[in-house]
Image (cartoon, rainbow, N blue to C red):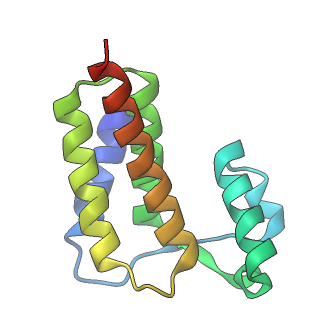
Amino acid sequence: MFTVVYTENAHTLLYAVHDMCEVSTYPVFVQLFDDDIVSLFGLTLISDPKCLLDSITQLTLSLYLMTQCQLKLRHSVTSLARTFHYIQLAQNKTPADKTVDQLTLNLASRRILIYVKMISNY
């Protein structure tokens, strides 16, 4: 159920012509994210303290959550390939100075690649 919502949301946001909504990454909100995202934010802050005032786009967050749902529910490789394609499109659309977005998208794509490699070895 959630995967369908995230997929529709990501598809809509990928092809939207208006600016995307952003989610604040202030410390009070970061604790609401999962451990991997919190670690990613922490490492980003250690390397560049200015990132504290950064934010993450709704598209990036939707793609990350979609990836997490698909991996936990063991979706097909075809479904994961579509998500991987969406992530690549989002990476191309996201400016390089949006560090948190780029790192989160990279994390999601690496997760997919690792999962596909793992299941192909069986």
Classify 11 as above or below 23. above
Q: Nearer the viewer, residue 87 or 20?
A: 87
**Residue 1 seen anywhere in this rendered image of the structure:** no
Q: 118 or 25: which is nearer to us?
A: 118
Q: Quadrant of the C terminus?
A: top left
Q: Residue at x 39, y 31 (%)?
A: 115
In the rendered image, the vertical position of residue 53 relative to residue 10, given as above or below: below
Rendered location of residue 114, percent (x, y) = 41, 36
Q: In front: 112, or 31? A: 112
In the depicted structure, whether residue 19 falls above or below residue 7: below
- The quarter of the rendered structure image containing the N terminus is top left
Give the x, y percent position of residue 75: 30, 24
Residue 35 sits in quarter: top right
Question: To which quarter of the image does residue 85 belong?
Answer: bottom left
Query: What residue is drawn where x is 35% and y is 41%?
Result: 113
| Residue located farthest toward the top when viewing the structure as drawn | 122
